[in-house]
Image: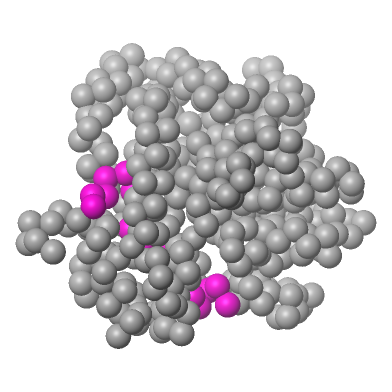
Amino acid sequence: MSFIMKKIQMVDLKGQYEKIKEQVNKSVLDVIESTAYINGPEVHQFQKELEEYLGVKHVIPCANGTDALQIAMMGLGLQPGDEVITADFTFAATVEVIALLGLTPVLVDVNPESFNIDVEAIKKAITPKTKAIVPVHLFGLAANMDEIMKIARQHNLYVIEDNAQAIGGYYTTKTGKKLKTGTIGDVGSTSFFPSKNLGCYGDGGAIFTNNDDLAHTIRGIVNHGMYKRYHHDVVGVNSRLDSIQAAILRAKLPHLDSYNKARREAAKKYTEGFSGIENICTPSCGCDAQHSCNCHVFHQYTLKVKNTDRDSLVQHLNENGIPCGVYYPIPLHLQKAYADSRYKEEDFTVTNQLVKEVISLPMHTELDDEQIQFITQTVINFVTK
Ligand SMILES: *Cc1c(COP(=O)(O)O)cnc(C)c1O
């Protein structure tokens, strides 16, 4: 390692900003000059551009990714007591909104290779009260949507895709169709939190659907349940993407594919660096040898370490100036807020193991080869010592 190596960051928002600074600064100043701060033309333009990019009929911008999930569930008319199946191994927002709406969360185990919701576990969890499945395309890799859609059709369930970590990724169906993640189920949601693959400079989110009626319902819900000014037909919320954030997102959207490509290239270099190292399991890139590629967009690059004290590895990396993350350290079914006597530990063997083994390495669009090599070598030194 040379002493001039750039400081390693988990996410390098500044480096990314520097490259689009002129455009972003101009866009933000234009909004300020225009005074169209709420629901201005930038929001509408961004909505249109994102619809086109995703190939989806409707994008409804909102305030953040958690709201997006909540509003999607409200739009589908889910009622207290309805059961909603989601993954035990994900960020808490997914289960939080289910509980908040008085719905019954049903957490199920995940697949140890993809980290995504396990389709057999979904089948086992279905009851007459089940109304929806929420797959999360965790870390940027699409869940098994062919199977999930099949189960949903068989049991007449809604599918709500939590696409907060996978925007710009796609899923290749069994019939060879490439569909953008978040546009496959009845409704999809995303977050524009700064560190997400398409992040703004504050909070933001969006809901996607191809269903005209659902889009109409949701447009009212995000705006206090109003379909006509001062006529409140349903109980809604106030959830808006503001114009400044929309302007920033418009400046960044044209770069999303190259951002995701940079992430995939960094992931490839990590994986090559770890090849043949015992006790390190690298993540799948989402492509199989034949033809189908699910195009992982690597929101996180997450290793599983075997026969290694993961927490000591975290400490070792930190001591060497390498930030890293543990996503996620506690299964949702063991969180105080979401514990439920119906859950049996033997139904969560994968999640219970993953929380001990996972470690996410720095991943962003500005990583250089020297940094990747230093990070890789520092991990290897620890696990092989
Ligand atoms: C970030 C994230 C959310 C929440 O997004 P916010 O914009 O922070 O509300 C929801 N689900 C997943 C999987 C996420 O990663």
Q: Which residues are magenta?
A: 353-369
- Of residue 77 and residue 334, the one placed in the foreground of this image is 334
Q: Among all residues in the image, which is located at the extreme left?
A: 3
On the image, the x and y values in percent for residue 147 come to 77, 49
Was residue 359 drawn as part of the magenta stretch in this picture? yes
Is the residue 308 above or below the residue 67 in the image? Answer: below
Image quadrant holding the N terminus, namely bottom left
On the image, the x and y values in percent for residue 352 come to 60, 77
Name which residue lies at 60% across and 41% down: 291
On the image, the x and y values in percent for residue 288 come to 59, 50
157 lies left or right of 363: right
Was residue 211 drawn as part of the magenta stretch in this picture? no
Name which residue lies at 56% across and 23% down: 51
371 lies left or right of 53: left
Q: Quadrant of residue 373?
A: bottom left
Name which residue lies at 50% across and 67% down: 328
Is the residue 260 above or below the residue 111 in the image? Answer: above
Name which residue lies at 59% across and 34% down: 180
237 lies left or right of 362: right
On the image, the x and y values in percent for residue 340 come to 73, 73
Is the residue 26 above or below the residue 317 in the image? Answer: above
